[in-house]
Structures are given as C-alpha cells and as structure tokens.
Image (cartoon, helix red, strand yellow):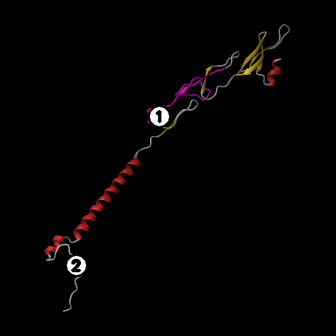
Amino acid sequence: MCNLYMFTGAGLKEKRGCDITADTVCEPMEGFFCTDLKSGSCAAAQKHRSCEPGQFISKMGTASTDTECSECISGSFSNGTMLSCQPHTQCEKENLQLIKAGTSSTDVECGEKSSNTTGIVIGVLVFFLVAATIGGGVFLWKYHKNTKPNSSTNQQRGGQAGGAEEEVALNMPVQETPR
C-alpha cells in the first residue's frame, strides 16, 4: 500500500513491510506529517506548512504535527525559513547610515556615511565669491569717488562749487598751441 503512495506523491514511505501476521506499516516521508493514522499506520500525509516572509518557524513540524508559524514583532524580520526573527541592524551602531528601512521580512539597508566634503567645498567657494563681490564693489565705489571732481576741488581751482560748465571745462582735454 505505501509503495503506491510513494510513487503518487502522497508523502508516505514504507516503515515495515507486510508479512504473514501483519500488514505493511507506512509513515510520512521527511517534510510531511500524518493526517490519517489507522491501526498504527499512516494512511495519508500532508506536506509541512511553509512560513511566509515576516513569520518565523515557532514549532518545527514532526511526523505527526504540522509546522507552526508566528509573526515577527516590530523591529525584527524573517524570510520565513528562520527559527526566530532577527532584530533589524542598527546602522548607527556600525557607523553607517540608513539607506532603506527594514520590514518584517527584510533587514534594513545600511551604507557608508557620506562625507560633508562637498558641502564644505561649496560653502568655502560661496564665501569667497561673496567676499570677492563685496570687495570688488567697495573698490569700484572708492575708485569712482576718487576720480570724480568734488566741490572742494572746484573751489581750489578758483571756480564756483557745483557749476555744470565748470565741471565740463575741467574734464575737457587741454589743447596745445603750436609754437
């Protein structure tokens, strides 16, 4: 009777062959459990349950019982084949940064901490750009102030302060007379 089940995928194998005084005794194959026990022989077997990702195997299946699964608690994970849920990796404790949060079926993803070198370089460049702009503006302001005649200069030359003609006259090129 077992041989027929073995070839049909029923999950049974022969435990003891039949003889003149007793029938064949069948038992579940590895990975199966007996669902119908008759007179000390397994008449039907079923494959052990597989736990889902996010669950762990809380009780291994035996020849007479199915596998039992339990849910992982928050902060832990299992791919469904583990005997307990594993705590999520603490990236900070490993001097890494969190790349992707973990789930009940996957661990977190950690990566190398990015250096602030880029931010520092950009900050220094911006500082020097602002400083150069301000410095350039101050230079141009002082240069323009020193090249423009003011009222005190006009009075020293004998003119009146603020006259437009005088300003034009002071700024006109001097023509040399032929000798």
Reply above or below: 113 against 159. above
On screen, residue 57 above or below 41: below
Query: Residue 173, how many percent across, how many down?
Result: 24, 81
User: Which residue corresponds to the image point at 28% horizontal and 65% vertical from the top-left?
Assistant: 140
Numbered mark located on residue 178 in the image: none
For marks 2 and 1, the one nearer the N-term is 1
Question: Is 133 displayed left or right of 146 in the figure?
Answer: right
**Residue 25, position as x, y percentages in the image:** 79, 13
Is the N terminus in the top left, top right, bottom left or bottom right quadrant? top right
- Type of amino acid under label 1: Cys
Q: Quadrant of residue 113?
A: top left
Using the image, determine if residue 99 lies above or below residue 46.
Answer: below
Q: Tell me the residue that label 2 is attached to.
A: 165
The image quadrant of residue 12 is top right
Furthest-top residue in view?
Answer: 21
Give residue 36's position: percent from left, percent from top. Answer: 76, 15
In the image, residue 138 sits, relative to residue 72, either above or below, namely below
Quarter holding residue 104:
top right
Q: Which residues are magenta?
A: 67-96
Which labelled disc corresponds to residue 91? 1
Q: In the rendered structure, does residue 90 fall within the stretch colored magenta?
A: yes
Report how far apart the C-alphas of labels 2 and 1 lie in the structure: 79 Å
| Front of the two marks 2 and 1 | 2
Q: Mark 1 Cα within 10 Å, few/some/many (few <14, many 20+)? A: some
Is 97 covered by the magenta stretch?
Answer: no
Q: Looking at this view, is 142 or 106 the one in front?
A: 142
Question: x and y percent of residue 44 in the render?
Answer: 78, 18
Q: Residue at x 64, y 25 (%)?
A: 51
Residue type at mark 2: give it: Glu
